[in-house]
Image (cartoon, rainbow, N blue to C red):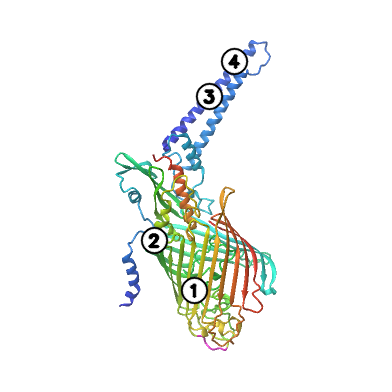
């Protein structure tokens, strides 16, 4: 039935309803009048309707109620055909091209009542957008549980972390120019009053505009973007991995979320092969408080000293470049590139190879604790990873290898800061292997649930040999780590995940890692 | 003088072996109709801008349905062609606007829908492969095809 036909039918039904109501009213009045007349003709005492009359009235009321219900169904279908607030198209009406078979029509009506993906509201899926075309999504992670605290001699402590709430505004400026951003609040945000007890972060994590030109070549204008290294750095929402924390390689060696001032070109070369090439501000070997960098954009002058950005304990975690106020500590640019593949001849397999290179990580004015200036040192990062879902099974495998190579470790601050425990060698590397199994749990609370038990082994060596610099050569072994991570991730929907993870951490440090944990998490992405 | 050649030559080589295609609008409705029903002599609109009956002469040969779903945050325009038995004949992505998740356009992924009917499960991770990095897009396109089969899969005859 076409839309005009539906309207005609609705109007016809309304006329019928009006007519039926009128007829019912007339019938009732007639019946009442008849009853009254009969009563008047009788001995004057009041009399109840006869069984026949009562039955007739009840049948009429039932018919009216059925018509009322039918009108509501048709009105609901008519409302669903109206365009959405974000300028989306009307959904295919259930009544279009439906045959006259009542069973098929009923089937179509049932489907029409189910919310379609295009009905998703633009603001967090729930509200109409105040700016047509602006869509805001979100992702977030809440974590809780018990963990060993190495600063408390490994004592187990309970805790909670509102780790992330990230807003994802997207705006289609034109058909070919798209705006994207990520605005992040970490660890509950920031506050200045003691009673608020906040020590988190409020930051811009991504901010860029894409010019979509042709399939093979698109330009991302200068903005804040993610380095195209590894998989999780660019796909870091909590529904993309099964453990409570992001995979270990992405906590230090690849300092996720590895965001940089950058511009890119990217495209799809053929089915199953795409690329990205990025130019960005270099990482910096300065990991101290922001306020310690001078107005001349150098490290604090000798002999104040400063913390290293690259160490054998934290890898590159404190080396990410500055993204604001022109306060970068060098003029150096970094180059990174990535190839994503999903070969059609191997369904279920996807992976990438990527690399990052900067000619220099040493900031302006860098020096050893002896006062000697530190020279330039390059950094090359390489990553290769794959994800394989065995077809027609629930089995999934993931594997990854990442390696960092330093041009001149003798010029890294960590090898010259008087601390022998955080020295950096010529290279750092890590590898990980993961196995998971997807178990359908069936329909619960009107959605299809899935459970994914998993195990991941990660080995990470941030202090390989080749130490140089003014520090004595005495790393503790804390930079050589093994992680055994096991748990389960339960997905009530692809947009929501409930996680439980146990992690055992081992290092070569005689004191031990003292960093085991049993954690739970709630993560969402929509 | 030759420095710029060193930078642009790789790009030029890539461009020369791949055929350029539009970044957002990959197919028009007319192009998608032709791909789905090469032998059709005409398409009779059943619902304006949404559903067409493919005909060869006076005989119906299938149904062509245009729809939109949300990818991650932006719309994906796609089309589903049904044959006379109500099976999916072809699925095409006409417009993809997002910066990530474009793997749903891969022919090998879309080929999974061919032969599906209104009785098929059409669930990601069951009979449709997920695409890591395009989870939401792959789920939403799958749900869209399922909806179209439920609405029209029994009425093509």
Q: Position of residue A142 (x, y in %)?
A: 61, 61
Q: Earlier in the sequence, mark 1 or mark 2?
A: 2
Q: Are marks 1 and 3 in contact (CB under 8 Å)?
A: no
Q: Position of residue A398 (x, y in %)?
A: 51, 65
Q: Which residue is mark 3?
A: A22
Q: Which mark is residue A174?
A: none
Q: Nearer the viewer, mark 3 or mark 2?
A: 2
Between A325 and A330, the one nearer to me in the picture: A330
In the image, residue A340 sits, relative to residue A150, either above or below, namely: above
Between A410 and A325, the one nearer to me in the picture: A410
Instruction: Check if mark 1 and mark 2 are on a common chain.
Output: yes
Q: Earlier in the sequence, mark 3 or mark 4?
A: 3
Cα–Cα span, label 2 and label 4: 81 Å
Q: Earlier in the sequence, mark 4 or mark 1?
A: 4
Which chain hosts label 4?
Answer: A
Which chain hosts label 1?
Answer: A
Task: Decide whether residue A371 is among the magenta residues.
Answer: yes
Q: The N terminus of chain A lies in which quarter of the figure?
A: top left
Cα–Cα span, label 1 and label 2: 40 Å
Instruction: Check if mark 1 and mark 3 are on a common chain.
Output: yes
Q: Secondary structure at mark 4?
A: helix
- Crowd band around label 2 with a 10 angstrom C-alpha radius: few (<14), some (14–19), many (20+): some
Q: Earlier in the sequence, mark 1 or mark 3?
A: 3
- Crowd band around label 3 with a 10 angstrom C-alpha radius: few (<14), some (14–19), many (20+): few
**Image position of A220 (left or right of A477):** left
Query: Which segment did they paint magenta?
Result: A370-374
Q: Which residue is mark 1?
A: A326
The answer to whether any part of residue A255 appears in the image is no
Q: Which residue is mark 4?
A: A34
Q: Which residue is mark 2?
A: A271
């Amino acid at each position: 039935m076409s839309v005009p036909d539906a309207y005609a039918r609705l109007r016809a039904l309304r006329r019928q309803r009006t007519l039926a109501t009128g007829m019912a009213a007339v019938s009732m009045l007639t019946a009442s009048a008849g009853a009254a007349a009969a009563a008047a003709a009788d001995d004057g005492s009041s009399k109840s309707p006869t069984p026949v009359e009562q039955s007739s009235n009840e049948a009429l009321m039932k018919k009216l109620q059925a018509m009322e219900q039918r009108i509501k169904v048709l009105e609901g279908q008519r409302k669903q055909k109206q365009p959405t607030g974000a300028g989306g198209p009307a959904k295919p009406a259930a009544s279009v091209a439906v045959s006259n078979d009542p069973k098929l029509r009923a089937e179509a009506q049932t489907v029409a009542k189910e919310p379609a993906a295009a009905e998703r509201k633009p603001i967090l899926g729930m509200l109409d957008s105040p700016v047509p075309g602006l869509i805001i999504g979100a992702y977030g992670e809440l974590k809780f549980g018990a963990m060993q605290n190495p600063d408390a001699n490994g004592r187990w402590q309970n805790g909670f972390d509102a780790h992330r709430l990230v807003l994802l505004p997207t705006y289609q400026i034109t058909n070919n120019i798209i705006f994207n951003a990520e605005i992040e609040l970490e660890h509950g945000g920031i506050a200045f009053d003691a009673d608020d007890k906040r020590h988190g972060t409020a930051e811009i994590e991504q901010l860029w505009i894409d010019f979509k030109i042709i399939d093979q070549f698109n330009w991302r204008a200068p903005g804040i973007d993610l380095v195209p290294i590894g998989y999780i750095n660019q796909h870091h929402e909590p529904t993309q991995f099964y453990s409570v924390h992001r995979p270990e390689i992405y906590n230090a060696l690849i300092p996720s979320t590895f965001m940089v001032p950058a511009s890119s070109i990217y495209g799809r070369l053929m089915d199953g092969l795409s690329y990205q090439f990025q130019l960005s501000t270099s990482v910096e070997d300065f990991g101290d408080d922001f306020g310690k960098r001078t107005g001349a954009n150098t490290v604090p002058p000798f002999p104040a000293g400063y913390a290293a950005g690259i160490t054998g304990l934290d890898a590159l975690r404190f080396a990410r470049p500055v993204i604001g106020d022109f306060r970068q500590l060098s003029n150096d640019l970094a180059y990174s590139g990535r190839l994503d593949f999903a070969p059609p001849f191997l369904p279920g397999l996807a992976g990438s190879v990527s690399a990052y290179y900067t000619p220099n990580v040493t900031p302006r004015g860098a020096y050893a604790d002896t006062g000697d200036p530190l020279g330039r040192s390059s950094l090359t990062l390489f990553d290769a990873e794959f994800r394989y879902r065995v077809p027609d099974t629930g089995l999934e495998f993931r594997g990854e290898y990442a390696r960092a190579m330093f041009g001149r470790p003798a010029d890294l601050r960590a090898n010259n800061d008087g601390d022998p425990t955080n020295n950096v060698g010529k290279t750092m590397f890590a590898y990980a292997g993961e196995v998971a199994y997807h178990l359908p749990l069936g329909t619960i609370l009107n959605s299809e649930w899935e459970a994914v038990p998993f195990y991941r082994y990660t080995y990470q060596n941030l202090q390989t040999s080749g130490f140089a610099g003014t520090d004595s050569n005495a790393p503790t072994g804390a930079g050589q780590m093994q992680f055994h991570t096991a748990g389960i991730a339960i997905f009530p929907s692809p947009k929501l995940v409930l996680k439980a993870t146990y992690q055992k951490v081992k290092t070569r440090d005689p004191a031990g890692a003292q960093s085991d944990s049993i954690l739970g998490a709630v993560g969402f992405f929509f | 003088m030759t420095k710029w050649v060193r930078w642009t030559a790789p790009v030029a080589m890539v461009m020369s072996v791949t055929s350029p295609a539009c970044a957002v609008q990959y197919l028009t409705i007319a192009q998608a109709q032709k791909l789905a029903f090469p032998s059709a002599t005409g398409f009779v609109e059943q619902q304006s801008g949404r559903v067409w009956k493919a005909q060869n002469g006076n005989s119906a040969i299938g149904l062509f349905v245009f729809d939109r779903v949300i990818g991650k945050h932006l719309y994906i325009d796609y089309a589903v062609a049904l044959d006379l038995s109500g099976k999916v004949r072809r699925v095409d992505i006409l417009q993809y606007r997002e910066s990530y998740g474009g793997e749903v356009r891969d022919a090998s992924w879309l080929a999974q829908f061919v032969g599906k009917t209104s009785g098929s499960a059409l669930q990601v991770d069951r009979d449709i492969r997920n695409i890591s990095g395009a989870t939401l897009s792959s789920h939403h396109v799958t749900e869209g095809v399922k909806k179209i089969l439920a609405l029209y899969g029994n009425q093509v005859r």
